[in-house]
Image (cartoon, grey):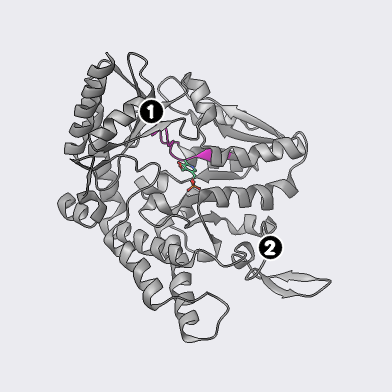
Amino acid sequence: MYDIDAIRRDFPILSREVNGKPLVYLDNGASAQKPQVVIDAITTAYSHEYANVHRGLHYLSNLATEKYEAVRGTIARFLGVANENQIVLNSGTTEGINMVAHGWAMPLMEAGDEIVLSVMEHHANIVPWHFLRERQGVALKWVDTDSTGALDPQKVIDAIGPKTKLVAITHLSNVLGTKVDVKTIIDAAHAKGVPVLVDGSQAAVHMPLNLDELGVDFYAITGHKLYGPSGSGAIFVHKDRLAEMRPFMGGGDMIREVSKDEVSYAAAPMKFEAGTPGIVQTIGLGVALEYMMGLGMENIAAHEDRLRDYAVGKLGGLNWLQVQGQTPDKAAIFSFTLDGAAHAHDISTILDKKGVAVRAGHHCAGPLMDHIGLTATCRASFGLYNTEAEVDALVDALELAHELFA
Ligand SMILES: Cc1ncc(COP(=O)(O)O)c(C=O)c1O
């Protein structure tokens, strides 16, 4: 039983008003709100349990280290990973993918090598690969989505050639809501000896995962979309890739010994976690993931599927609204434009007046926007606490925007 009223009460911000209207928060794709248990965990950590981790021998340092390190196991459980030493803690997906680009890909790739990407990647899974293109002549090979926003896995597989060194692909598009059949891609890429990095920033929020079964090489997640604090996150790196990867950042915590002439490194994953980490953020992320697992990822997914179906019906009834991304099993993420060429920013401003928070812009997905021929869309992205009544509130606000611009 998914008790949506009780769940909503867990998130204090959801009871506030915006512009004199009840908040309808539909910007979860950008960042999700935090349940009270996460807020409490942050307060407790700073009020009673704070010290730096890993270094001290005093009580508080040991306590903070224990709490922080326990999150590695929580993330492993959440992701379906048996060996938690394959979880590298970090500040989020952007850091995770940059670590792989600098530490694993750069030393391994040379001019003429190729990276296969889908056209619907977020800039966090594009720009680090552009660094390799600019700096060492690596070629980026793009695979397009079809007119419904679907990505045919066979097209990705066909793009893998003898020079391909990596496939870097999203599991779920932050703009279209499209889910990608990454399992088929991973199996075929591995048959050709090519590792696969999956950007799980959105997928981890909306679907149960089992990375051990998926057999992925790299899988990036980001805490603030998972109802946890910003500045928290992790990347799963398969142990064979960990063994190949060089540290990206150097500093405290990641070394065994340092002298004037030499340095030796800690074992993975510590080797890839230089400096004082986001201690409290990570502790908060652990609590957020426990909260999600407490609700059950299957239950969250089923709730969001119901919301998606309801929203598809309602938005589909607005013949002056164009929704990008029409795949039937998509996530409850809707990017849209309105007839009359009203700019996405203007639409979102009107929705905001009605208390409805959506995102407007290019959604950090330049190649996709080029592909669909738009400079900006509005995006309503739903989360575990949203309701059908909020879909109705979105539709009411859109009707107002349509009247004003028609
Ligand atoms: C699909 C996808 N990848 C990567 C990111 C980047 O995440 P972060 O900014 O938390 O590193 C986002 C965030 O919007 C995203 O939606």
Query: Is residue 390 among what the camera can see?
Result: yes
Q: Magenta region: which residues?
A: 168-180
Q: Which mark is residue 250?
A: 2
Three-letter residue code for mark 2: Gly
Q: Position of residue 321 (x, y in %)?
A: 30, 19
Q: Which mark is residue 12?
A: none
Q: Secondary structure at mark 2?
A: loop
Which residue sits at x=76%, y=39%? 136
* Relative side of 211 to 353, left or right: right
Eye-nearest disc, 2 or 1: 1
Query: Is residue 11 among what the camera can see?
Result: no
Of mark 2 and mark 1, the one earlier in the sequence is 2
Give the CA separation, mark 2 to mark 1: 41 Å
Quadrant (top left, top right, bottom left, bottom right) of the C terminus: top left
- Nearer the observer, 338 or 19: 19
Which residue sits at x=72%, y=36%? 134
Q: Secondary structure at mark 1?
A: helix
Q: Which mark is residue 345?
A: 1
Residue neighbourhood size for the residue with mark 1, other residues' Cα within 10 Å, grouped as few (<14), some (14–19), many (≥20): some
Three-letter residue code for mark 1: His
